[in-house]
Image (spheres, rainbow, N blue to C red):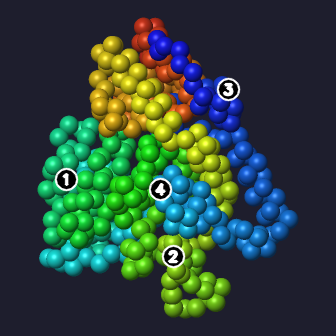
Amino acid sequence: MLPPTPDPLLRFRDEFPILATTNYMVSNSLGAMPRAVSERLADYAREWATSGVRAWAQGWWDLPIRVGDEIAPLLGAKPGETVMVPNVSIAQAQVLSALEFVPGEKDTIVMTEMDFPSVKYVTSQLGERFGARVVVVPSEDGVSVDEERLLAAIDERTALVSVSHVLFRSAYIVDVARVSRRAHEFGALVCLDAYHSVGVVPVDVEVLGVDFLTGGVLKWLCGGPGGSFLWVRPEVSERLAPAVTGWQAHSHPFAFDPDMSFAAGASRWLTGTPVIPALFAAAVGPRIVREAGMDAIRAKSERQTARLVTLADGRGFPVTAPRDGRRRGGTVAFDVPHAREVAQALLSRDVIVDYRPGAGIRVAPHFYSSDDEVESVVGNIDEILAQETWKRYTLQQSIVT
């Protein structure tokens, strides 16, 4: 068992109702809902009901920027530099649409085999349509990025390096600062998918040296679906104009000018009418994360994920996660026998995890998780295997994504 350790972060548990009834270990997929979200959504309904269309002028219109300002401190960004968009696919498409690819010259996008599929879909489909050549760097072990090979793939033809900060499949932390330095040596820009890092791993866009950062509040930031964010380095933003755009990005949106005139600053990266209910919900979780403190969250995450690795090793379960805690994000996956069925049995016990083919059961404690809960996940797996209760779930399909 883990030695008893005073844990000041557990004071936040009461802010998350689901923790009273479940062992919630899936914040890498959907963070627990803060209690205050219900109040915020009620505020949205009340404003719509009482103000109607006037609500736009009473605060709705500015929400994509104001909520972005709630995220900015967690990125090392300044106020007014981050905008909210509906999802990362849109954010990535905006970035690609702002670039010019010159055949035979600056025409290449470099990414890795381990990047999240949705980002790869957008990059391959849209990038190639814009004339880009997409180079995908393979992984040797299915856990990490071969960073030497990645650096070698960046050359004078590279226009954009599009990589993940933390790999979704293995929680491996990429040395992004090193990648950025190499890219900038060749005049390439860097777009970072930080969906699996912001909220559990400290992020600083200046230290990382990236030009674009995309992410969302769905997971570690406990902000729910529909709230993603895009940060663009101001000096880069000033010289680019995204083709994937909308009327909120116009300098005078209510003039209904038939010709596009981009707004100044981060607003030029807005799109169409924002998803207001999602933005009402999105800011509560990041505020709690900021109050908890990223250094404390990271230290706890390293400790609890290390314990999960030790527990898995002790049982001979193959682990899909870096052994070095400095290179490991917030998730540990281990492939137990009959893993898909065992995951279903865990769900039936209100132990909330998820399963991924090739990786196994993914366990993701967060700042609100207790050490006892970490131990309990593996203890429940032991019981399910010993009692063979996993057999009840051989024909069921998981709905946890």
Query: How many other residues sit within 10 Å of disc 2, few (<14), some (14-19) or many (≥20)?
Result: some
Q: Position of residue 113 (x, y in %)?
A: 25, 49
**Nearest to viewer (mark 4 / mark 2):** 4
Label 4 – label 1 distance at C-alpha: 25 Å
Tell me the residue that label 4 is attached to.
Answer: 76
Residue in the image at 35% along x and 70% along y: 96
**Nearest to viewer (mark 3 / mark 2):** 2
Q: Is residue 369 left or right of residue 20?
A: left
Which residue is outermost to the bottom? 258
Label 1 – label 2 distance at C-alpha: 32 Å
Label 1 – label 3 distance at C-alpha: 44 Å
Which residue is outermost to the right? 50
Amino acid type of disc 1? Leu
Tell me the residue that label 1 is attached to.
Answer: 150
Q: Earlier in the sequence, mark 4 or mark 1?
A: 4
Amino acid type of disc 3? Ala
Residue in the image at 36% along x and 23% along y: 309
Query: How many other residues sit within 10 Å of disc 3, few (<14), some (14-19) or many (≥20)?
Result: few
Q: Earlier in the sequence, mark 3 or mark 2?
A: 3
Q: Position of residue 234 (x, y in %)?
A: 44, 72
Tell me the residue that label 3 is attached to.
Answer: 20
Q: Earlier in the sequence, mark 4 or mark 2?
A: 4
Tell me the residue that label 2 is attached to.
Answer: 265
Dividing the picture into quarters, in which one does residue 349 lie?
top right
Amino acid type of disc 4? Gly
Q: Earlier in the sequence, mark 4 or mark 3?
A: 3
Of residues 394 and 370, the one nearer the viewer is 370
Q: Earlier in the sequence, mark 1 or mark 2?
A: 1
